[in-house]
Amino acid sequence: MSGNGQSDALVSIGTFFMPAGTRFTQHTHRTHQLAWASRGTLTVDVASRRWVLPTTRALWIPSGVPHEVVSAGRTTMTSLYLPMSPPADPGQWGMVRPTRVTPLLAELIGYLDDPDLGPECRAHGEAVLLDLLRPVTATALEAPLPTDPRARQVAGELLDDPACALAVEAWGRRVGTSGRTLARLFLADTGMSFGRWRTLVRLQAALPALAAGEPLHRVSRAVGYGTVSAFVAAFRRETGTTPGAYFGARR
């Protein structure tokens, strides 16, 4: 870990170099945190929700909220710690919120991480940073975890093996219920159909490989798609853009 070490800084910055599989088990912070993968991809679990964050997204985590962080591949996590919320509509920052990391915001974070930055320049930079923080209106690739034990077991197995092609009926038999009941449990617990939930998990699983520049045909097969076109269509349907454009803002 490294930090800017400025005792008079409003925004403290820590950099964590995370080999593949690094896990920061559930913990909390006294200040608000903005968790960002400046390189690679981060997975953050908060209660029953999971966010997979490429370099173009960060996650605002209010103080006191328990969360767990995992790196699927080699990742650099840059964390910002803030004692106050952004001034724009402060009421919306009381919950976990994904934010967009624009090239300007990324450069500004690097600027504030300079230990030799003077107090006046730092204060100006911090004010601009707070103004730039904007929540993403639609949380891309968010797959809430179901709470029912049967659905939760299926969810856990699919998270371990997102390419598994078992139909909902077969999954139902596997956990001692019917496919219809299992589908109903997923809809009640996550707000989405079993099929869409599995699609989101597959796309989540693809993000680390996409961030690393793996070829699309290899990524598609690894997460259960027979063709690149099917994978790209699913990705566009859920994010509104292609895999290349999703990462393009930082490349």
Image (tube, rainbow, N blue to C red):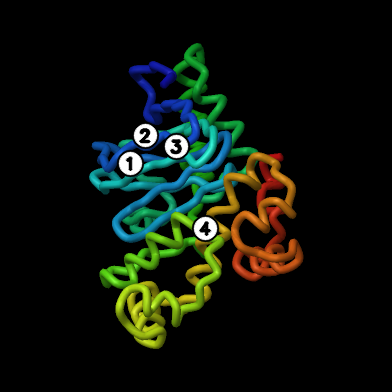
Amino acid type at image mark 3: Gly
Q: Position of residue 134 (x, y in %)?
A: 50, 52
Whether residue 140 is visible to the viewer of this picture, yes or no, is no
Whether residue 117 is visible to the viewer of this picture, yes or no, is yes
- Of the numbered discs in the image, which one, if any, rests on residue 81? 2
Judging by the rendered image, the residue that carries numbered circle 4 is 136
Judging by the rendered image, the residue that carries numbered circle 1 is 32
The tag earlier along the polypeptide, 1 or 4, is: 1
Q: Position of residue 13 (x, y in %)?
A: 42, 27
Q: Quadrant of the N terminus?
A: top left
Judging by the rendered image, the residue that carries numbered circle 3 is 21
User: Which element is circle 2 on?
Assistant: strand
Q: Position of residue 141 (x, y in %)?
A: 52, 61
Left or right of 76? Residue 229 is right
**Residue extending furthest toward the top:** 116
Separation of marks 4 and 2 at Cα, in angstroms:
19 Å
Amino acid type at image mark 2: Tyr
Separation of marks 3 and 4 at Cα, in angstroms:
27 Å
Separation of marks 2 and 1 at Cα, in angstroms:
6 Å
Mark 2 or 3: in front is 3
> Which class describes the residues within 10 Å of circle 3: few (<14), some (14-19), or many (20+)?
few
Amino acid type at image mark 1: His
The tag earlier along the polypeptide, 3 or 1, is: 3
Separation of marks 3 and 1 at Cα, in angstroms:
25 Å
The answer to whether mark 3 and mark 4 are in CB contact below 8 A is: no
The answer to whether mark 3 and mark 1 are in CB contact below 8 A is: no
Residue shown at the point (47%, 14%) measured from the top left: 115
